[in-house]
Each structure stands twice: as structure tokens, then as C-alpha cells.
Amino acid sequence: MIKFISHVQVPANNLDHSIEWYVKFLGGTLAANFGDFAIIDLHEGPNINLWKTDDKTTSTFTVNGKPFPTIGIEVEDIEQVIHSIKDSGSDYEGDGHPVYDEEGRKFFRFFDPTGNMIAVHEEPKR
């Protein structure tokens, strides 16, 4: 029946700027730009489709008033990603350091240029 999740879709207030940001700061590759939307390939897992919009909207939702991401990305080096996000000037949650869970996973949550929250996580080294 279901094979896999092929893509996720998020709004982009400035498509060209968002494409540049996802490529430069998240390491994605521009797979296609159709003018109204673009496909960013993150090299593993689903693609991210960026949809050009003038609406005041994001893919971020809230739980008890706290923002939550719709996209979670596993990374190999979370410190490098955090450095890249800080260099991008994007907003992020917390003090700019990863948060650890009880099993030693590292998490960091930040926002793309449109305000879509993204979470990255690094699994503990075994």
C-alpha cells in the first residue's frame, strides 16, 4: 500500500531567498525550480518542496502555546549545523546550544527565513 514519504511541503515568502538558504545553510541541493515552487533534495529521505506564497503562514504549529516543527532532520554533526544556522542569521530556540534527551540524543530547533520551524537531531555515538 504505502511505500514511503516522498516529500514535505512548506511555504516560502521569498522563494529565491528560501532556495538559497536551504542550499547554503542546510546543505540541500536544488533539484528543480518551477517558479511557483522548488524542490530541495536533502540527499536522504523526503525532499522539501518550497511553495511561493504571499500569505502570512508557516508550517509551524503549537502545542500548549509552544512552537513545534513539522520537519525533523537527523544530522551527523549537530554542532556544524548550529554554527551554520547562527551564520545564517536565522532565529533559533534556546541559547544556541543543543538540548539532550535522556538517551543522549542532541536536538536543536530553528526557523527558516519564512518562519517554518525545523528540528535537527544527532544520535548518540555508540
Image: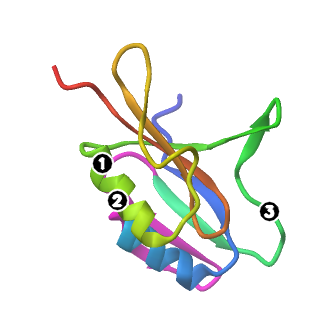
Q: Residue at x 56, y 44 (%)?
A: 94
The residue where tag 1 is placed is 79
Mark 2 is surrounded, within 10 Å at the Cα level, by few (under 14), some (14 to 19) or many (20 or more) other residues, namely few
Q: Earlier in the sequence, mark 1 or mark 3?
A: 3
Query: The C terminus lies in which quarter of the figure?
Result: top left
Q: Quadrant of residue 26?
A: bottom left
Residue 22 versus residue 102: which sits nearer the camera? 102
Magenta segment, which residues? 26-46
Q: Residue at x 62, y 43 (%)?
A: 69
Mark 3 is surrounded, within 10 Å at the Cα level, by few (under 14), some (14 to 19) or many (20 or more) other residues, namely some
The residue where tag 3 is placed is 57
Residue 33, position as x, y percentages in the image: 50, 81
Check disc 2 and give the amino acid type: His
The residue where tag 2 is placed is 83
Residue 44: say if magenta: yes
Q: Residue at x 45, y 79 (%)?
A: 20
Q: Is residue 37 above or below residue 118?
A: below
